[in-house]
Amino acid sequence: MSAPAKSSAKLTDKQVVASRLLGGSVKRSYDPAIDIDWKAPLDPERFFLPPGMSTLYGTPLWDGMSQQQRIELTRQELANILSVGIWFENILIQGLARMILHNDPTAPHVHYALTEMGDETRHMVMFGRVIETIGAKPYPLSKPQLAVVSQMPRGLRGTMLWVAALVGEEIFDTLQREMVADPQLQPIVSQLMRIHVTEEARHIRYAREGVMRRLNEASRFDRATVARMSGLGGPLMAYAFTNPEIYRRVGLDPKVARAQALANPLHIANKKRGFASLGKFLMENGVLSPIAQRSWRRSGFLD
């Protein structure tokens, strides 16, 4: 197999990009502690995710649920997604901190990395507070998962750091953009998503520039390795959407529910829309080998 070609995408100097992103951070940043109405009561008739974004929407299990059971399912699905977001942001912060150690602390590129770390720290607090406020409990990692996740920051270096950042951020970001203005949502969820979408747009720009820059500097071996390793994101993200504990908490058989979710054409369509822009970017830049593409396809994110 030949190595992927170097990125042909337009590449802007990283310090120029970082300076622009720093300016954007000054103009449009939020403090969830004051920008979310934490005292507003929950509406018992509103969902925590739009029904069409639930993993079971349109399945026999969904059709057999009462309205309140459906609302509870979306509460647990949101709590699960936010829990995944917390441990992902934790990994990303550690990866950025390691990167900063090897760079000039006076450079705008480093200053934006520090700014992003601040954003992500606030997001972790916001996610945790929202889980508590909606009356849910977080979804902890199992001991085996914790052992793996604890080692991940050490392996996320160079191009893989930026690819991992995009996988963890862009899929959910795309779907959040569809959800943020949905009138069926609890107001606190809309407020969270509005903050997250605004700030993640800068993080995604930063990560995409990082991918293109590193690929143009990488050896053929490194590019080929990243192109193969990027396939690991598919099964990881598929599991993140359909953690069996979600269904257990709402009184469903987790094996039956997860099987219906994974086979659900509406859930698969949501995953494909979430991955479409990122998948195109990764393929255009040679970051999805045929093996990696098969992994994302088997996980329901690619046709």
Image (cartoon, rainbow, N blue to C red):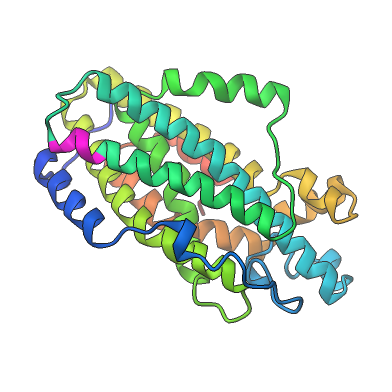
- Start and end of the magenta stretch? 108-112
Q: Nearer the viewer, residue 200 or 191?
A: 191
The answer to if 110 sits in the magenta stretch is yes
Q: State whether the magenta stretch is mostly helix, strand or loop.
A: helix
Q: Is residue 288 among the parts visible in the rendering?
A: no
**Viewport quadrant of the N terminus:** top left
The answer to if 200 sits in the magenta stretch is no
Q: Residue, x 54% and y 68% (percent of image)?
A: 37
Q: Is residue 186 above or below residue 214?
A: below
Where residue 48 appears, x then y in whole percent? 66, 66
Q: Nearer the viewer, residue 99 or 276?
A: 99
Q: Residue, x 41% and y 56% (percent of image)?
A: 31
On the picture, is 17 further left or further right than 161? left
Q: Residue, x 51% and y 54% (percent of image)?
A: 303
On the picture, is 265 further left or further right than 38? right
Q: Which quarter of the picture shows residue 121?
A: top left
Q: Is residue 208 among the parts visible in the rendering?
A: yes
Where residue 151 appears, x then y in whole percent? 52, 18
On the picture, is 107 further left or further right than 286? left
Q: Nearer the viewer, residue 71 or 195?
A: 195
